[in-house]
Each structure stands twice: as C-alpha cells, then as structure tokens.
Amino acid sequence: MNHDEQQDTMLVLAALIASGALAFGSVALAAHLLNQALRQRDRALKQREDLLAQKDLLMREVDHRVRNSLSLIYGLLTLHQRHAATDGRLREPLGDAASRVLTVARVHEHLYRSGVVDRVEIASYLRELCQALAGSLLPAGASDALRVRATPGELKVAQAVSLGLIVAELVTNALKYAAPSSIAPIEVSFVVGSGLRLVVADHGPGLPDSFDVAGERGLGMQVVEMLVRQINGRLDLDRTGPGACFVITAPLPS
C-alpha cells in the first residue's frame, strides 16, 4: 500500500470514528432527554395524584360535615314533631320535612362510608332509607310493615337523591293512610334493567277513582311529579291490585 492509499485509509477510518462518536453522542443525548422527560412526567403524575388525593379528602370532609348538619336538622325536626303530637296541623308538615331531610342525609352518609364521592349503590341506599323511615314513622317492632326489594346498581348522586325523595314521599303517604302491618305491608320494589323501574305499593283502602296524579294539588304529589320529571321518567297508577300502587319508570342515566 503506497503512501496515498495509507492516507486515504486513515481518512476513512477517521471519518468512521467521527461518525461513530457522533452517533454515540446523539444516542447519549437522546437518552438524557428521554430520562429528563420521564422524570418530568413522573413529577407531573405525582402532583396530579396529590391533588386528586387532596380533592378526595376535601370532598369526604364536606360530605361528613353535610351529613352531620342534616342529621342535626332531622333530629330537631323529629323532636319538634314529638312535641307537636297534639297539633295535627304541625305534626304532619314537620314529619314530611324530616323525611325529606333524612333522604338527603342518608345519601351523604352512604357516600362517606363508601369513600365514593360521585355515585351511590342504589339498592343498599334504598334499604337503609326505608329502614330509617320505618324506624321514625312506625311503632317500635313494626319495621316488617315496610319491605324493600332492590337490584344492585350504581347511580349518580343527583339521580339517587331524586329516587330517594320519591320513595320517601310515597312511603310517608302510605304510612299515613294505608295502616300497614306485617300481614299487609308497604312494598318498595326497584329494578335496574333496560331502564329504571320503581314501584311503591300498599294494601290500604286505595285511591278514589277520581284520583289523577297530574291534577293533584297536594304538596307531596307535586314534589313527586317534579322529581319524576327530573329523571326523565313517567309516573303511572296500577289499579289492578288492592291499595295504592305507584309505578315510576325512567330510562337508564347516560
């Protein structure tokens, strides 16, 4: 190999070495930038997790405070109701107000225990609500005069509150007028299928033939109608059996 060929070979080797060094440097730089980006991502995720944890803690604390406040209001209303035992004009509206407060209080109690801040397990919520209504409105030992059957399912808080208030209104009316007992109980049924179906039925004297939900002026039925509209539902009467039977159907929430 002559001098010129040696010189060309050295130039080629130098070029290859320079290219390799450049490639290695590029890889090293890319790895450094990637590691830096991963560290920034991890820090951002950690900050996000911390913020979510703080938000969850805050929501749980708010639910706790709301639950305690509602429980206090419910206790005051029931106390005034007992003191107004001889005055029917006060006792009935106080009882109705207490039932409505209890409905919302039960939602917040359910949320606080479950740790979930935006959804409610509807079956256990309705059972707990009806147990509380029976405990406050029925004589001691007569809780089997109100029975609940419900399929499990989760609903958003607003939907659960609407259904709970509907149940509270209809059950309270049945407790007033149907004289329920273990033999002739009030029956609450809730099914989640292709849609939502709620039935509240009793074995009392039933509704007069002239009864029309849309034409009722009582506050309770007006509240029920409003709540049914809120869940885009429909309220019907089933007159095939004894007593009063209200049927509410609604589409599954989106």
Image: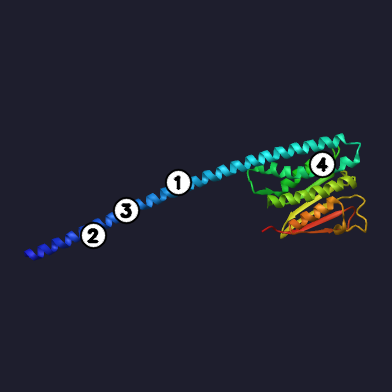
The residue labelled by disc 3 is 29
Q: Position of residue 141 (x, y in %)?
A: 84, 37
The correct choice, above or below, for 234 with respect to 73 in the image is: below
Gap in Å between the C-alphas at discs 1 and 3?
21 Å
Q: Which label's residue is closer to the chain start, 2 or 1? A: 2
Gap in Å between the C-alphas at discs 4 and 2?
85 Å
Residue 106 lies in quadrant: top right
Label 4 or label 2, whichever lies nearer to me, is 2
> Which residue type carries mark 4?
Ala
Q: Which label's residue is closer to the chain start, 1 or 3? A: 3
Q: Quadrant of the C terminus?
A: bottom right
The residue labelled by disc 1 is 43
Compare residues 231 and 145 and report the one nearer the observer. Answer: 231
Label 4 Cα crowd, 10 Å radius (few <14 / some 14-19 / many 20+): many
- Asked whether, in this view, residue 116 is left or right of residue 123, the answer is left
Q: Which label's residue is closer to the chain start, 4 or 1? A: 1
The residue labelled by disc 4 is 134
